[in-house]
Image (cartoon, grey):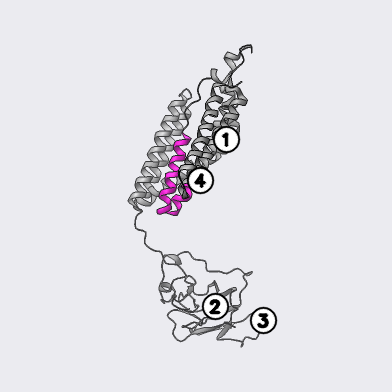
Amino acid sequence: MFTTGSKLFFGATALSVACAVVFAASTGGPTGIMGTVGLLSLAIVFGFLAGINFFNADGNVPGMQQGAEYTAAAAQPPVGSSMWPLVAAVGVAGLVVGAVSTPVVFKVSIVVVLAATAEWMVQGWSERASADAQYNAGVRKRMLHPLEFPILGALGLGAVVYAFSRIMLSVDKESTPWVFMVIGALIAVGAFVFAGRRNASRSTIVGICTVGAVALLGAGVASAVQGQRTIEEHPTTSGSALCLEGGTEVEIDDHASQDVSAKSSVIANIFLQSNDVVIARIPGFTDPEDNFSTITVPRSADVGIRFHNDSSSPQRITARLGTFGDAAEVVMCTTVVNPGKEAFLSFKIPKTNAASSTPLELVIPGVEGQQIAIVVP
């Protein structure tokens, strides 16, 4: 017996086939082929739907079935609205924007679209898992909560940390500790209030936490838009400006280590003697007269040297590791070493076919005419 729904789809199938025949006979060329294929595809879809509808008999419920008026699908209340189509639409819009702007927007949008699609599919399936709405909700929770809660917690924590960092970087250095203490005090006071008022309703607690989170995120976004404060560049032991200047002590030298572990593996010990003469002693040469002015360093290997400052003034040792091509000269150094102390310097000669336009050597800034040549096989 053909039901009302199956008659509709069978009629649509026949009409699509007839239109395809007429269109193919009246229109030639690529347009005719494309239109005919489209109409035949439509006929196949309508035929498939007609078969499903005929097999299910329009979802009709037999009148003799006990309790059918309560268990039939038509008797169930409509499912609630879903936010995931909107989230997926935002993700698709982000794909378009990210394709012509920033790659990170495109990548985040892909994640949003995939997550929204998965959530939407599981929600659609769970809402029709049975005739019991509570059971359907429980099925969805068992499926997605083990995945949703860790991800949402990580995203929320990351957003709070990012917002807090933007706030700290936007205020000036003198005010940062006070801002940190004020925000921490507000969080602590709020926690004490919640702990003391045991009879506070859940909605009140959620509302206050939501307002606080929105305020923190809003302040973080505003701080990010404003930009971080100007942070002056701190000197490092890999910059020529510091390593090639003699007698200069900067912030990085404060409280620097003045001793080297006995287990440190070094290829040479460099001594700045009391007469400001620099010598190198190679492990394995035990004669006190075995003082060298050159050391051999293998290419593309991390090596270390120990610098001994036997002079009467603080000094540092600098490794000038060459200038290759248009790049700047590679320079590394230790922190300032006090008299009678020592320091460790690790460096690596890169593997390259180009010759250096500057010498490879170990020098003491401020001590002229004293260097240890570096020979690279």
The disc, 3 or 4, on the residue closer to the chain's N-terminal end is 4
Q: Amino acid at mark 2?
A: Thr
Marks 2 and 3, how far apart in space?
30 Å
Residue 312 at x, y percent in the picture: 47, 78
Front in this rendered view, residue 187 or 11:
11
Camera-side mark, 4 or 1: 4
Give the magenta-colored segment's residue range.
83-109
Camera-side mark, 3 or 4: 4
Left or right: where does residue 328 sit relative to residue 131? Answer: left
Camera-side mark, 2 or 4: 4
Q: Amino acid at mark 4?
A: Val
- State the mark number for residue 284: 3
Marks 3 and 4, how far apart in space?
60 Å
Q: Residue at x 51, y 30 (%)?
A: 12
Q: Which residue is mark 2?
A: 352
Marks 4 and 1, how far apart in space?
16 Å
Front in this rendered view, residue 31 or 91:
31
Q: In this rendering, does residue 175 appear at all? A: no
Camera-side mark, 2 or 3: 2
Instruction: Label the magenta part by its dominant secondary structure.
Output: helix
- State the mark number for residue 144: 1
Residue 10 at x, y percent in the picture: 55, 29
